[in-house]
Image (spheres, helix red, strand yellow):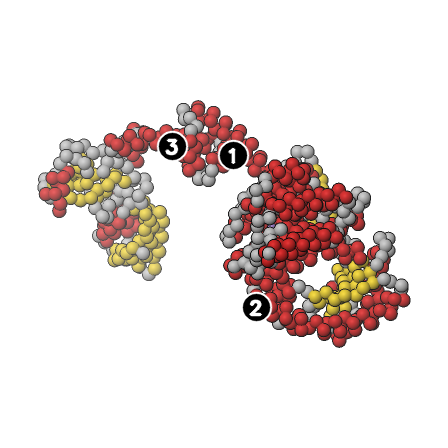
Amino acid sequence: MRTETLIEKENKEIAKQYKELLRISYQALNAEDKRLIRSAFDIAVDAHKDQRRRSGEAYIFHPIAVAKIVASEIGLDAISIASALLHDVVEDTEYTLDDIERMFGDTVARIVDGLTKIAHLKKDRNISQQAENFRKMLLTLHDDVRVIIIKIADRYHNMLTMDAMPEHKQVKMASETLYIYAPLAHRIGLYNIKTELEDLSLKYTEPEVYNDIAERIEQTKEEQQRYIDDFSKVIKKSLDKEGLGYNIKGRMKSIYSIRKKMIAQNVSFDEIYDKFAIRIIYQSDTENEKFLAWKIYSIVTDHFTPNPVRLRDWISSPKSTGYEALHITVMGPEGKWVEVQIRSERMHEIAEKGYAAHFKYKHGEQKELGIEEWLNRLQEALESSNGNAVDFVEEFKLNLYAKEIFVFTPKGELKSLPKGATPLDFSFHIHTEVGMKTRGAKVNGKLVPLNTVLKSGDQVEIITSEIAKPNQNWLDYATTARAISKIRSSLKEEKKLIAEEGKEILRRKLKSQKISLGEDVVNKMVMYFKLKTSLDLFYRVGIGSIDNQKIKDFASSYNNAFISFFKNKIRRKPVPADINREEITAKYDMLVFGRDEEKLNYKLSKCCNPIPGDDVFGFISVNEGIKVHKKDCPNAISLQSNYAYRIISAKWIDSSQEEFTSEIKLTGIDNLGLMNKITEIISDNMHVNMRNLNFSTDGGTFTGKITLVVKNKAILKKLINNLKQISGIEKVVRI
Ligand code: MN
């Protein structure tokens, strides 16, 4: 009896939630929409009937809650609401995707399929795994962007109902939300949900910090309301006088952004002066919207001094997310700076709802950037993404949060790009086709390099050419994820094509060297040319940086590898060719002995008959002076071991090469014929040349300096001794 009552109560609550879902839908629902949502609701109820959440409540409350977020906070259509109701059906129950398609058609089926795929991705604490999930999730955008929006709503609701989960799972989910879902929500223009996701994440990752800030905000609430009232009082009269319909509210900074500011500026809660902003939301028709914003600006600044560097005009140049408003900071009551956000009701709705509101207002206007176009833009960047998923996410996140610049096309259309963007980024932003054919760019009428950093207000004209195509340098010129991924995949494509050609060229060239292109040869070549992959090898052959000669060099080293292998086997030393032999004979024409390389008399031994150039040694024989033997003479070993003390080293030298200059100084008593005698002795010594001669006499004494070219020290020594023998010479010394 008691159980029945509880279930009845629960069923009543489910019915109530369902009615509320229809009631709070932002989009007007027609009868057909309602039928679709009703049958989705019925199937979801049936599918999840035996499931309960960890908290104990019936599972169906979760899909209903997600559908409510989609319907009301995000404001999407009936297809989205139905898909949200069904988002866990295929993942968690007996129903199949075919069932969904049969009952709801292929649009709903595709969305549910995308959501099921995301749910299947293995969840891991590992950051690269997260990033990989993220990438795959974004790839499902290919089917429908509504997949991503419903996924955000799903995550939002899970974050709201996370208390029953174990703590480690809470922290993991919160981190993932901060890393992936909050930036995504921001990019889609779901500012409120982004803020909620951030605050909820902080609540689980740093509960103490979160509670502390939340408490302090609560404490300062009254004070703030008083401040806002003071502010309103001052401008109310002037606004009323203009007959404006308006509403003045305070807007507290989120807990997460206060926390961020406290860390970034290293300040306490109390030291943050812009914890809240004042919002003036005014009524207006489309025509007067901008005019009225500036009228209100004028009224506010009549009473409060504005800070000129803190004026943001998002009305003339809306953010790429579609955000429009006029932001000013003024010196408010009590001498405190306060930010004032001036928005029309329409602008406010867009800020709150994002794209859904955008379409509602802009419906029928062709020029408006639709969600489809936005989706396509995002999609293009994602599809061609390859490589490291973390890099990709970082790159992508950078783009999400980057400050924007606004530039103009030659026709005066406004385009928003991330700060730091170049003409090449602009080019790819316009269209991939334009990007691919970029030849040059003009900024404000002047030709500029493709890596010029664009500034807000620049007018950019892209010069295209049919023969232009991306090259490696472009990767340095582009900064946006979209351009970089496009260039990369184009380069990769081209490299592949060239590599294919290169492979055929290589096959032909190796064939002419009697080598066939097998895996082993490819591996050896990759190693030989110090490359990483076979693709690199084929590509280099294709572009000709590995040319005919290099291939031949490889071929001969490859073929020689066999020959030297056999040579080593029989341990044969290479024999110098005959030409070398003759060269050596001619060149090494003189034998010198001992450490001083003296020229001595010798005889060549008959037993081994050495010739110039041979490795030799001298043996001092008893009767015949020095006899020269080859080192490998059959008698050498016995001579060397028995008469080691009679061995003198010997070597062949090149008589034309071995010489050094030396200077000697002679002093003595000047007498007739002395000069002659000196030169005679020097000339008579073979292998000594005079290069410089300098004599001077002074009062009967003489000094001479002679520069000599000699073969070795021994010769010089002998010469000096000979010179000393001349009568009248007193001293001969080397300088
Ligand atoms: Mn779910």
Residue type, label 2: Glu
Give percent across and percent down for residue 271: 65, 72
User: Which label is found at residue 193?
Assistant: none
Q: Kindly report the distance in space between the C-alpha atoms of the residues bearing marks 1 and 3.
A: 22 Å
| Labels 3, 2: front one | 2
Give percent across and percent down for residue 381: 63, 44
Residue annotated with mark 1:
539
Helix, strand or loop at label 3? It is helix
Q: State the quadrant of the N terminus.
A: bottom right
| Labels 2, 1: front one | 2
Residue annotated with mark 3:
557
Is residue 151 in view? yes
Q: What is the crowding at mark 2: few (fewer than 14 residues within 10 Å), some, or many (at least 20)?
A: few
Q: What is the crowding at mark 3: few (fewer than 14 residues within 10 Å), some, or many (at least 20)?
A: some
Q: State the quadrant of the C terminus.
A: bottom left
Q: Kindly report the distance in space between the C-alpha atoms of the residues bearing marks 3 and 2.
A: 70 Å
Question: Which callout, 2 or 1, points at the residue further toward the start of the chain?
Answer: 2
Residue type, label 1: Tyr
Is disc 2 in contact with disc 1, using a CB cutoff of under 8 Å?
A: no
Give the answer, above or below, for where 585 lies relative to 640.
above
Residue annotated with mark 2:
208
Residue type, label 3: Ser
| Labels 1, 3: front one | 1
